[in-house]
Amino acid sequence: MSETTPVIALHGGAGTILKSNMTPEREAAYHAGLKACLEAGLKILNEGGSALDAATAAVMALEDNPLFNAGRGAVYTTDATHEMDAAVMDGATRACGAITGICGPRHPVLAARAVMERTEHVFLAGEGAKRFCENAGLEMMEPEWFGTQQRLDALKAEMERRRLGLADDGDPARKHGTVGAVALDKHGHIAAATSTGGMTAKTPGRVGDSPVIGAGTWADNKTAAISATGHGEYFIRWAVGHEIDARMRWAGQSLAQAAGDVVQELGELGGSGGLIAIDAKGNIELPFNSPGMYRAWCGADGVIHTGIYGKED
Ligand code: ASP
């Protein structure tokens, strides 16, 4: 059987720093971080590893990088706590796992994988999920490990804005962020992984789209592997991952058309954000309706690209 050329894409969230606030140093740090995280996943694919392992490895690298809102660098709730969400899905089998509202595992994506691989369940929440992670032997961290001054400042600014009753200034960097990866391996299988701290100043207990299978995370070899980022409530209401699947499956649309249209339609309804998507043929789509989306990808030509804003960069 002929081998498929591996392909991988990742995102570091739609909560990009506005171009007007970006400095060349920060921009370079984001590009370098995106590239290094992509390489972590690509290495696994090039050594013959699975799409699921590659997507997981890329997300683990993103979780450890405090520039991105997942794992270390996660945003804060209104209680100044962290509640992290993550999910993984294997396109070959539709096996999946997810966790929500958790603060403990250094790598929430590994917690989602453990749910998938070591339980008969798909989705674990809160205290029970944390206990499961401890029992599963996952590396656990104190809450302080996840915090950064930048996220604390963002929480303070958001709380102050609310206190004063001011309009949202629309700066996505203050509120948004998530990380995710999608991959195609040499066996022609695709997979998706997503991890997030959610949205800054979210109500404790709030669950976003990232861990919701069919909303922020989705994978089926017949259609696409998808990881989303943006205003999660909209992504849940429009079942974004599954909506793209349905348009491809039932209307025969290409990945480009289905993913592009859904993201555009969401934007028209007020749901800002974007997603990364691949299919089993190796097509990659990275649509977003926000001012930017941190992203990196490597197609069948083996060339690594990184981007933050529009197509020009
Ligand atoms: N989608 C994430 C959530 O709603 C946040 C983001 O990607 O900006 O939790």
Image (tube, grey):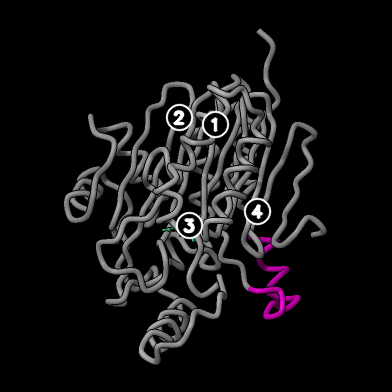
Residue 305 in the image: x percent, y percent? 75, 49
Question: If you read the primary sequence from the N terminus, does the residue marked by circle 4 or circle 3 appear first?
Answer: 3
For the record, the magenta segment spans 18-33
Distance from label 2 to label 1 (Cα)?
8 Å
Answer whether labels 4 and 2 touch (C-beta < 8 Å): no
Residue receiving disc 1:
51
Disc 1 residue crowd, few under 14, some 14–19, many 20+, Cα 10 Å? many
User: Which residue: 47% across, 59% down?
Assistant: 231
Would residue 54 appear left or right of 209 to someone viewing this image?
A: right
Specify the quadrant that holds the N terminus. top right
User: Which residue: 58% across, 56% down?
Assistant: 268
Answer whether labels 2 and 1 touch (C-beta < 8 Å): yes
Q: Quadrant of residue 262?
A: top right
Disc 3 residue crowd, few under 14, some 14–19, many 20+, Cα 10 Å? many
Q: Establish if 173 lies above or below 39.
A: below
Residue receiving disc 3:
63
Q: In the image, what residue type sits under mark 1?
A: Ala
Distance from label 4 to label 3 (Cα)?
14 Å
Q: Nearer the viewer, mark 2 or mark 1?
A: 2
Q: Quadrant of residue 256?
A: top right
Q: In the image, what residue type sits under mark 2?
A: Asp
Distance from label 1 to label 4 (Cα)?
18 Å
Residue 52 in the image: x percent, y percent? 49, 33
Would residue 302 appear left or right of 157 to someone viewing this image?
A: right
Residue receiving disc 4:
295
Question: If you read the primary sequence from the N terminus, does the residue marked by circle 2 or circle 1 appear first?
Answer: 1
User: Which residue: 69% across, 45% down?
Assistant: 297
